Amino acid sequence: MKEKESLDSKLLELKIESLRIKREHTLTVFYQSLFIYSSFMFVAVIGFVNRYLNSSALSILLLIAILSLIVGVVPYTIMILKEEKEILKLYNELAKKIPK
């Protein structure tokens, strides 16, 4: 009996650790896209203020910046929602096992 409980406990820990790894991976992608966004915004503003860029080049840089941010935010949001569902499912499974 204790072996089964220990095995269930280790399996639960592995599932949670797997979720953490996936979250950290998507968080890394998010941070990279945030850095790219910041870089494009910095270049666009400095270039436009110093008159190195015209308004069409500024618009293109801003569009690329926004698209890079979207590319980072969407996977992170999807991963967070999946993680939330998985944790809720694990919680419900554990709640059923506990006698009342």
Image (spheres, grey):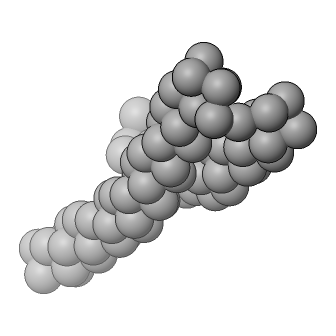
Q: Is residue 34 above or below residue 27?
A: above
Near-viewer residue (71 or 78):
71
Near-viewer residue (33 or 63):
63
Q: Is residue 19 above or below residue 92?
A: below
Residue 83 horizontal/vertical position (percent): 53, 52
Residue 65 horizontal/vertical position (percent): 67, 43
Exactly how many numbered labels are in the figure?
Answer: 0
Residue at 63 percent across and 35 percent down: it is: 52
Residue 93 horizontal/vertical position (percent): 50, 55
Q: Is residue 6 visible?
A: yes
Q: Is residue 17 above or below residue 71?
A: below
Residue at 13 percent across and 81 percent down: it is: 3
Near-viewer residue (75 or 33):
33
Residue 35 horizontal/vertical position (percent): 43, 45
Residue at 80 percent across and 33 percent down: it is: 54
Left or right: where does residue 11 sit relative to residue 22? left
Near-viewer residue (83 or 22):
22
Residue at 73 percent across and 49 percent down: it is: 64
Please identify the quarter of the rendering in which residue 23 is found.
bottom left
Which residue sits furthest right?
56
Left or right: where does residue 76 sit relative to residue 11? right
Which residue sits furthest front?
51
Please identify the quarter of the rendering in which residue 56 is found.
top right
Q: Quadrant of the N terminus?
A: bottom left
Please identify the quarter of the rendering in which residue 51 is found.
top right
Q: Quadrant of the C terminus?
A: top left
Q: Is residue 1 visible?
A: no
Left or right: where does residue 30 sit relative to residue 13? right
